[in-house]
Amino acid sequence: MTATIHLIDFFSFIVLALLVSLAISVFIHNRSGTVNRLFALFLLDVAAWLFVGYLYNLFTGLLPRLLLLQIVPGSLMGALFYYFSRAVAGDGFRMGWREWLVLLPPLLILLAAGRIALSPALMGEFSGMVWISHYRLHRPKDALYVGYSIYLIAAFVAGYAVMIRGAAAQRDRKERNRILQVLFASILGQISGLVLNNLLTIVGFGQYGYYSLVPIFLSLAWIAYLLIRHRMWAVERLLEIIQNREAALEEHHRSIEADLDLARIVQQRLLPSELPSVPGLVLHALYIPAGKVGGDFYDFRWGGNRLDIIVADVSGHGIASAFLSSMIKAAFHGNGGPAGPGLLGVLDSLVEEKGAGFMFATAVCCSLEIPAGRLRCSRAGHCYPLLLRRDGEPVELKGSGRGLGFGLGPGTHQELCLDLHGGDRLVIFTDGITEAFNGERSMFGEGRLMDAVRGGRGMEPREFCGLLLGRLEEFAGPGPWDDDITLVVVDIDGG
């Protein structure tokens, strides 16, 4: 056994090292990708095949056994290339029973090679027919080598066919070009290797293995570059898709914002443009939506010496709540009777029929009869209105009544009837005030509201509303708050 190293052997080891480096690089760049994993295995298999070839050029005494050993990575090369082609073409890859059948010819080839290696007679006969002359390998054109070569050619052609079919079915231009480039690079390297090694051996000229290194390595490096570039292109494509979708979402968001702006304008027009001027009463109303479109609503009707007031709170916020509020407004103005249990019964049926899903509403209806000095108050699941007597404590008007939208029928809502005196104050509000939270998730509550009502005694209604908002901001911070806020204050003129 001799080992003489020449410059061409040094070049061969450099190529071998580069192949291993390419395999590692391809795997690292996308270790989760089937294409990259299969190509990394293919590169390592080619490197193993070349390594055995370098060995028998260095140690010519081991040539026969190393040639049989080289069949192991050589026969697996065809199966790995076919699997790789399936993955590249987008045909998917998984080891089903058909994929396992691709390994059957290499298994038969390995068994035939093993039979020669284990039989002294066959091994002696085989050894007498192989030699190397001036870096050209000569070996017998036996059935083993012919079958081995035919299998490699068939596996490569099958892989080419899979990639051609995948490219033809691919609609994405960049993806189709990538498949075609991998196909062209594969044909360049493999045809060169088959011609300079297998076919020349079969026709009797011997292998030109070293000359095939250049096209083989260039083709493999080209494919590795394409796979790594594809990974980078995939990331760029993903970023492009994300940017396009963000732009589409932003445009959609602008459209929604425009719709909400229109809905806000419509809702603002649902509220009274100005408060009615009622002899003997001083009024002020305040509405602060939690978002662009809220669910609270208030309105007035004045005529026949009677002021009707409604304050409603539709569940949720947004366009659906505003739409239901508009229907409540229409029903409020379309009903000729006083704002009492009869009106609440009509509204109950309306919300049940027109409300979407599980929508409901709460409401308070008050009728102030002027100059009789009489207050009639009905509520439907709403916060208790407060009546602050001129010389007394604020009183909650606790008439019973379930919310609107449950279809409970007539007799559901109780009406309270009270006398009014000069200096009395009626305060109607929604739960956005009492249920406002601070940073510690504590609620403003009825107690703080009562304190504000007491503290605002003697103030004008507008001034009192400012006082209450100031205390709310002091407790929960500046708005907007979690829920809509509506406040209607009516003072009975003491003069």
Image (spheres, grey):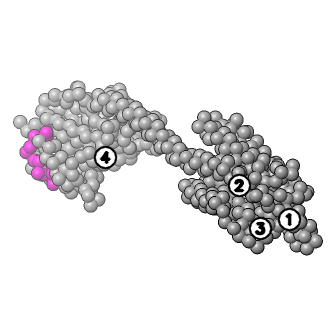
Q: Secondary structure at mark 3?
A: helix
Circle nearer the viewer, 1 or 3: 3
Disc 3 residue type (three-letter): Thr
Q: CA distance from mark 3 to mark 4?
A: 89 Å
Helix, strand or loop status at disc 4: loop
Q: Residues within 10 Å of mark 4 (few under 14, many from 20)?
A: many
Q: How far separated are the C-alphas under marks 2 and 3?
A: 16 Å
Residue 67, compared with residue 159, is above or below; it is below
Distance between mark 1 and mark 3 Cα atoms: 19 Å
Are there few (<14), some (14-19), or many (20+) residues within 10 Å of tag 2?
Answer: some
Residue at x 86% of width, y 65% of height: 113
Give the x, y percent position of residue 255.
40, 32
Identify the mark nearer the N-term, 2 or 3.
3
In the displayed structure, would residue 464 be above or below residue 303?
A: below
Q: Which residue is mark 1?
A: 113
Answer yes or no: do the residues labelled 1 and 4 have beta carbons within 8 Å?
no
Quadrant, the C terminus: top left
Q: Which residue is mark 4?
A: 483
Q: Secondary structure at mark 2?
A: helix
Q: Amino acid at mark 4?
A: Asp
Q: Nearer the viewer, mark 2 or mark 4?
A: 2
Which one is nearer the viewer's eye here, 49 or 269?
A: 49
97 versus 336 height, above or below = below
- Reading the image, the residue beneath label 3 is 60
Q: Is residue 263 visible?
A: no
Instruction: Give the Cα distance between marks 2 and 4.
Output: 81 Å
- Give the residue pinned by disc 2: 210
Numbered range of the magenta stretch: 450-462
Amino acid residing under circle 2:
Tyr
Going from N to C along the chain, the mark reached first, 2 or 4, is: 2
Identify the amino acid type marked 1. Ala
